[in-house]
């Protein structure tokens, strides 16, 4: 063991929120994630109930919200490894505030047609896409290595708070002040989050190689994943979840609540809140335990739980039945989120963290709109319940097969 390792091991345990700059990033992330989850809900709510459009149109607007991730995420990851990360976050968040204000003004003026909503969703998605890899790459920069999994768990709590508070508060504000009020709420919250970004101090990059085209920068990240077969398999599972289970729950379930259970699409908000409570519980467990053994097995088991809950969501015949399923989904989701991100960051060198997290964000965000559009089209023919359950079967089959056949991945971490 080196002297540095001895010093780190001997140092007293210190929670990541006691690090001032990580605390500022986390405070900003609470606002950012609340808006990110509110956006997906509010845009879908606006299309389904405000414009009285179909579930395929809802899938289209969510597709517009997420499609920038496909084209911008890899660039954003490379920028995070090269340029001023604080400035990147500030610029993207200021731009997002402008998009939310512009959308609110469109709605209040009565000009919020489907075309305008698609354009607003695209711009909102673009600003989020650029900021997300920067945020993820900063976590291991602002905390010590022995704090990493706790810091990721704390960050997952921020995402959890957003799942609980984002759709619920947006629904309450929308009920009181209309759809335009829901977008004003998002603009104000992002503005509050900016105050924390203005105070954050981020270490400068180390010595960087000469500037190269983005494609060459990204190839390095692909090679890192290609050469680590465990991370390669992990990314394959994440990709499959991004096309099946994730969009089934985050998007198609909203149409399912309206079309097959006879409720308003806005009634999905309490279900997302219940899911968030589950994520909070399991994230606190991860945060308290810190560096857990067999993280690969925990990740795969969590994915199995999520896929199973998703299957039964599609088979539900009463609204109340969705609440325990959403809670179970969340309990598995906390381990799913913390284990996969922690394994990736713990096995990625710092100088390419932005690019690898760009690929991670592409899988997490960029595939969601593709999956939502695909499932929306299938749902228009097969029904939303059958589509949700079918997506769950695909995801569950893949992860069970991997779990049985790849014993080394179970022991990873």
Image (spheres, helix red, strand yellow):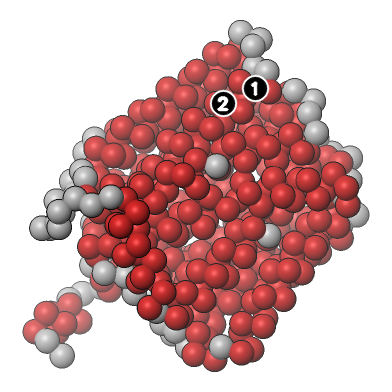
Which residue is located at x 58 percent, y 53 percent? 367
Residue 146, label in figure: none
In the picture as drawn, the residue positioned furthest to the top comes out as: 109
Q: CA distance from mark 1 to mark 2?
A: 6 Å
Could you tell me residue 327's position as x and y percent?
A: 68, 61
Q: Residues within 10 Å of mark 2 (few under 14, many from 20)?
A: some
Q: Position of residue 200 (x, y in %)?
A: 22, 43
Q: Is residue 238 above or below residue 10?
A: above
Figure quadrant of the C terminus: bottom left
Element under disc 1: helix
Task: Answer whether residue 66 is visible to the viewer in this image.
Answer: yes
Instruction: Give the left or right position of residue 333, taking residue 244 as reference.
Output: left
Residue at the spot of label 2: 119
Q: Position of residue 351 (x, y in %)?
A: 22, 62
Q: Quadrant of residue 83?
A: top left
Camera-side residue of 96 and 70 = 70
Q: Nearer the viewer, residue 256 or 124?
A: 124
Residue at (62, 65) in percent of width and height: 240
How many dots with numbers? 2
Residue 250 position (above or below residue 397): above
Whether label 1 touches label 2, CB < 8 Å: yes
Secondary element under disc 2, as helix, strand or loop, is: helix
Is residue 177 visible in the rendered structure shown here? no
Q: Which residue is mark 1?
A: 115
Lateral position of residue 147 relative to residue 55, left or right: left
Report whether 110 appears left or right of 163.
right
- Eyeballing the image, is 364 above or below 116? below
Residue occupying the point 42% across, 44% down: 72
Where residue 204 sits: x, y (%)? 14, 51
User: Does 307 appear above or below 117?
Assistant: below
């Amino acid at each position: 063991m080196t002297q540095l390792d001895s010093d780190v091991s001997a140092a007293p345990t210190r929670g990541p929120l006691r690090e001032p700059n990580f605390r500022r990033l986390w405070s900003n992330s609470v606002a950012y994630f609340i808006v990110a989850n509110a956006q997906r809900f509010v845009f879908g709510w606006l299309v389904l109930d405000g414009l009285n459009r179909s579930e395929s149109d809802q899938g289209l607007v969510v597709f517009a919200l997420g499609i920038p991730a496909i084209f911008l995420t890899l660039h954003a990851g490379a920028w995070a490894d090269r340029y001023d990360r604080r400035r990147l976050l500030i610029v993207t968040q200021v731009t997002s505030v402008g998009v939310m204000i512009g959308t609110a003004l469109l709605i209040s003026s009565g000009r919020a047609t489907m075309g305008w909503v698609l354009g607003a969703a695209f711009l909102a998605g673009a600003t989020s896409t650029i900021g997300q890899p920067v945020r993820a790459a900063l976590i291991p920069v602002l905390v010590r290595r022995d704090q990493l999994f706790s810091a990721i768990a704390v960050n997952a709590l921020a995402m959890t708070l957003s799942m609980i508070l984002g759709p619920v508060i947006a629904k309450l504000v929308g009920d009181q002040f209309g759809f335009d009020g829901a977008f004003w709420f998002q603009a104000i919250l992002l503005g509050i989050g900016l105050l924390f970004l203005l105070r954050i101090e981020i270490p400068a990059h180390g010595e960087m190689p000469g500037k190269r085209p983005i494609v060459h920068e990204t190839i390095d990240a692909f090679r890192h994943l290609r050469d680590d077969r465990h991370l390669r398999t992990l990314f394959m599972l994440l990709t499959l979840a991004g096309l099946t289970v994730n969009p089934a729950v985050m998007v198609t379930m909203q149409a399912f609540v309206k079309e097959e259970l006879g409720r308003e699409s806005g009634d999905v908000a309490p279900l997302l809140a219940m899911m968030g409570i589950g994520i909070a519980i399991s994230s606190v467990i991860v945060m308290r335990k810190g560096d857990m053994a067999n993280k690969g097995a925990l990740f795969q088991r969590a994915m199995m739980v999520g896929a199973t809950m998703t299957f039964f969501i599609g088979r539900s015949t009463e609204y109340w039945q969705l609440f325990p399923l959403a809670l179970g989904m969340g309990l598995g989701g906390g381990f799913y989120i913390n284990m996969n991100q922690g394994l990736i960051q713990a096995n990625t060198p710092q100088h390419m963290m932005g690019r690898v997290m760009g690929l991670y964000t592409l899988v997490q965000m960029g595939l969601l709109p593709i999956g939502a559009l695909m499932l929306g089209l299938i749902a228009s023919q097969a029904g939303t319940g059958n589509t949700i359950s079918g997506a769950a079967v695909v995801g569950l089959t893949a992860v069970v097969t991997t779990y049985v056949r790849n014993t080394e991945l179970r022991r990873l971490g």
